[in-house]
């Protein structure tokens, strides 16, 4: 895997040790993909946490970030990333950049192009600055409404939605390449993790993977 270097900010021996523990825990919880585990082991989650919460960075929990949103639980990040079944050369679209943690985990893959969309102005600004500071380079980071996907950059081999979608946005299905995977938590209060695989122009396989809880996927920009 490509080792992106987190240049500016610190990553102490203590953080690294806690991260190894986290990787072990995720393995015990059933994450098998070695590349996913390596990516989690590589990305310093403490650089994506809100200040004051740094001590909790390697607990397997979601935490609040700006604009009433959350940084996803590491298990959820690993689980969704595993379901994407990423391959070298894939173009991946993430809906809901938030803290940028999931984006960084995707960028830790070798040869993957990452596009990501955030609808909250405040998070878009904060996370743009953070990406610059850390020299993290998604192919595109867009301020916009993820319900629309990113038609200009389609098709995608993988699309990941990191907010709870009341319904599956049609544009996202349409922007999948043949063979492409959409991983999306579907539902209102609780969500069912769902994966669509595009088999043909109008043919999709759908499979579900248990219950999760996300902040809602909201329409338009804010
Ligand atoms: N991947 C993020 C998860 C953040 S929570 C992380 O690891 O930190 C979900 C994010 O989805 C929030 O930042 C929220 O503002 C964003 N979001 C909600 N609806 C959206 C939409 N329609 N388009 C793009 N982003 C959206």
Image (spheres, helix red, strand yellow):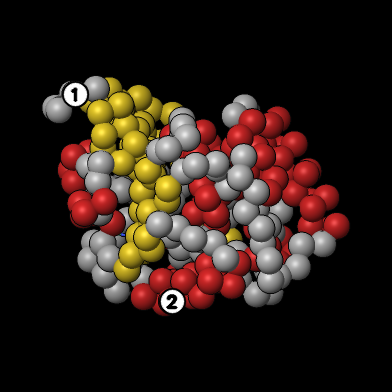
- Residue 111: image location, x then y, percent: 49, 42
Give the camera-side residue of 221 and 210.
221
Q: Which secondary structure, mark 1?
A: loop
From the viewer's perspective, tell me whether residue 87 is left or right of residue 43.
Answer: left
Dividing the picture into quarters, in which one does residue 110 lie? top right
Image quadrant occupied by the N terminus: top right
From what the image shows, is residue 5 above or below residue 133? above
What residue lies at 76% left-to-right and 62% top-to-bottom? Answer: 11
The residue pinned by badge 2 equals 125
Mark 1 surroundings: few (<14), some (14-19) or many (≥20) residues within 10 A: few
- Residue 136: image location, x then y, percent: 54, 61
Task: Give ligand 1's quarter of the image.
Answer: bottom left
The residue pinned by badge 1 equals 200
Q: Which secondary structure, mark 2?
A: helix
What residue lies at 49% left-to-right and 60% top-to-bottom? Answer: 137
Q: CA distance from mark 2 to mark 1?
A: 38 Å
- Residue 119: image location, x then y, percent: 32, 66
Mark 2 surroundings: few (<14), some (14-19) or many (≥20) residues within 10 A: few
What residue lies at 57% left-to-right and 66% top-to-bottom? Answer: 135
Image quadrant occupied by the C terminus: bottom left
From what the image shows, is residue 89 above or below residue 121? above
Mark 2 vs 1: CB contact within 8 A: no
Residue 178, can we see it? yes
- Residue 12: image location, x then y, percent: 82, 62
Tally the numbered discs.
2
From the viewer's perspective, tell me whether residue 47 is left or right of residue 186.
Answer: right
From the viewer's perspective, tell me whether residue 196 is left or right of residue 109.
Answer: left
Residue 185, can we see it? no
């Amino acid at each position: 895997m490509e080792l992106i270097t987190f240049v500016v900010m610190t990553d102490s021996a203590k953080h690294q040790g806690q991260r190894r523990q986290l990787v072990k825990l995720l393995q015990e919880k059933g994450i098998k993909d070695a590349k996913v585990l390596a990516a989690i082991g590589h990305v310093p989650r403490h650089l994506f946490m809100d200040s004051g919460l740094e001590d909790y960075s390697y607990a397997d929990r979601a935490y609040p970030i700006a604009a009433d949103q959350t940084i996803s639980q590491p298990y959820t990040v690993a689980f969704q990333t595993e379901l994407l079944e990423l391959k070298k050369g894939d173009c991946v679209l993430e809906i809901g950049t938030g803290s940028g943690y999931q984006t960084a985990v995707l960028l830790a893959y070798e040869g993957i192009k990452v596009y990501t969309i955030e609808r909250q102005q405040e998070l878009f600004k904060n996370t743009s600055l953070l990406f610059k500071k850390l020299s993290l380079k998604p192919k595109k980071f867009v301020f916009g409404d993820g319900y629309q996907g990113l038609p200009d950059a389609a098709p995608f081999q993988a699309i990941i939605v990191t907010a709870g979608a009341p319904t599956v946005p049609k544009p996202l299905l349409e922007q999948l390449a043949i063979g492409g995977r959409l991983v999306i938590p579907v539902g209102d209060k609780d969500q069912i993790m769902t994966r669509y695989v595009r088999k043909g122009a109008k043919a999709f396989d759908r499979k579900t993977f248990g219950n999760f809880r996300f902040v809602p996927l909201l329409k338009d920009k804010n």
